[in-house]
Amino acid sequence: MSMSSPPALVAWQQKYAKDVVQTASDLTVAQRKLELAVVHVARANELLRRNEYDLALNSAENALVVSCDAVLRRDGFAARSHVARFAYPLLPTVLLQNAGLLRRIRTARNAAQYEASGVVTRTFAAQAIKLAEDAVVDVTRAVAAG
């Protein structure tokens, strides 16, 4: 953390000190994460077409996670928790402005994965996929800008 770090970044690092590791910036790893996010989005769309809404949501959430990881790696961080990852203050606006939706996606994914199948509706899965698609676009721009 440098002396010129934005206050929000400093606060994030302090709040999630046990969940965040500072590393060197790695644009190659960031790009690989983005490529993986694209795969997860494609998989989510295919699962949605097959009426596998729980699995579609899971793949969309995976895309969101690795999209966040791409930004973190660009900036020289790695996160060990989803809470820390999604709270990173330098994420693209589409992710920061949809924190509530991200929480609902994570909650529904947990319910579908660990409690009962069939809890995710087509509409909600499609909403999660749309957010993942938008995130991939914005994160791609952010990583390209370096």
Image (cartoon, rainbow, N blue to C red):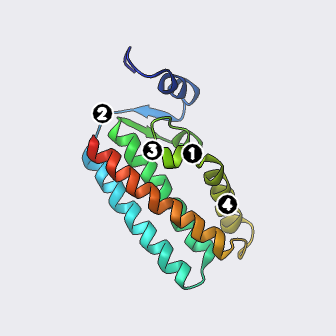
Q: Which residue is mark 3?
A: 92
- Mark 3 neighbour class, 10 Å CA radius: few under 14, some 14 to 19, many 20 or more: many
User: The residue under label 2 is which amino acid type?
Assistant: Ala
Residue 142, image x, y percentages: 34, 45
Task: Measuring from the top left, give residue 103's x and y in whole percent.
Answer: 65, 51
Spatial CA span between label 3 and label 2: 20 Å
Q: Which residue is mark 1?
A: 97
Pick whichever, 105 or 96, lies toward us: 96
Instruction: Specify the amino acid type for callout 1.
Output: Gln
Give whichever of discs 4 and 3 has the lower sequence position: 3
**Of the numbered discs in the image, which one, if any, rests on residue 24?**
2
Depicted 66 relative to depicted 83: above or below: below
Classify mark 2: helix, strand or loop: loop
Is label 4 in a helix, a strand or a loop?
helix
Q: Quadrant of the N terminus?
A: top left
Mark 1 crowd level (few <14, some 14–19, many ≥20, 10 Å Cα):
few
Image depth: mark 3 or mark 2 in front = 3
Nearer to us: label 4 or label 3:
3
